[in-house]
């Protein structure tokens, strides 16, 4: 099976504007407070790096690595923690940072888990969202932009571990598909 970059869906300049806008909103909303921003590895690493450099309030950065697995039915998806964060978030203002929300199952379980640690507040910031793919009702408090249900790569998003470094969000073509 071969695959290649078909089209640019979101050019880097547009992504930069979206990141600027999100950082401005977050900085305004958390004025006078400190935020713990938790990047969900691996996909969020580029978005998080861009976002935090534009935020003007104090930020503590941490990461979690999770793996979703769907034993039995897809709707029973649970998240396995591969790497937990090091920061104690009790009483802290926490924002989970995701590159993309798809079914919503990863985020749903992550939110449930982090809420048991009694943060002062818990919100979600996602760069991209595929609302058509949702299996559970959940949304980002801060969303970059909704996108169509295409296989996208770049800006942290991968196909089989590749393409995360592309500066634009692109559509992947896989030979044998309908291209
Ligand atoms: C992606 C993305 C989210 C999750 C969203 O991660 O970063 O964590 O999938 O999907 P969901 O809404 O259907 O749960 P992925 O599992 O591809 O890992 P990666 O970030 O390491 O690429």
Image (cartoon, rainbow, N blue to C red):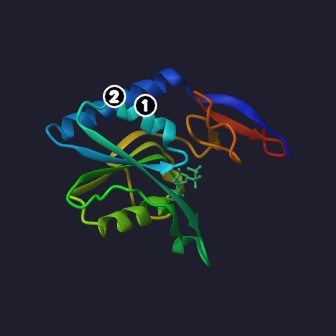
Q: Residue furthest bottom?
A: 72
x 75%, y 38%: residue: 173
The residue under label 2 is 54
The residue under label 1 is 50
Q: Quadrant of residue 72?
A: bottom right
Q: Residue furthest left?
A: 32
Q: Is 94 in front, or is 107?
A: 94
**Where residue 59 appears, x then y in whole percent?**
29, 40
Q: Secondary structure at mark 2?
A: loop
**Where residue 102 appears, x then y in whole percent?**
52, 53
> How many numbered marks, from 0 up?
2
54 left or right of 71 in image? left
Q: Residue furthest top?
A: 13
- Mark 1: few/some/many CA within 10 Å (<14, 14-19, 20+): some
Q: Secondary structure at mark 1?
A: helix
**Where residue 130 appears, x then y in whole percent?**
51, 48
Q: Is 2 in front, or is 149?
A: 2
CB at disc 1 and ligand 1 closer than 8 Å: no
150 left or right of 97 in image? right
C-alpha span from label 2 to label 1: 7 Å
- Mark 2: few/some/many CA within 10 Å (<14, 14-19, 20+): some
Badge 2 vs badge 1, beta-carbon distance below 8 Å? yes
């Amino acid at each position: 099976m071969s695959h290649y970059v078909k089209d640019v869906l979101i050019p880097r300049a547009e992504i930069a504007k979206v990141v600027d806008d999100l950082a401005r909103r977050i900085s305004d909303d958390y004025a006078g407070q400190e935020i713990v921003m938790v990047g969900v590895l691996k996909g969020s690493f580029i978005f998080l790096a861009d976002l935090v450099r534009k935020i003007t309030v104090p930020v503590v950065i941490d990461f979690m690595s999770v793996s979703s697995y769907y034993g039995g039915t897809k709707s029973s998806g649970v998240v396995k923690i591969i790497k937990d964060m090091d920061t104690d978030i009790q009483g802290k203002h926490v924002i989970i940072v995701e590159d993309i929300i798809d079914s919503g199952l990863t985020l749903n379980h992550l939110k449930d888990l982090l809420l048991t640690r009694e943060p002062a507040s818990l919100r979600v910031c996602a760069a991209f969202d595929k609302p058509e793919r949702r299996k559970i009702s959940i949304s980002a408090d801060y969303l970059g932009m909704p996108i169509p249900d295409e296989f996208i790569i770049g800006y942290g998003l991968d196909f089989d571990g590749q393409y995360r470094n592309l500066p634009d969000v692109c559509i992947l073509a896989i030979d044998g598909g309908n291209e």
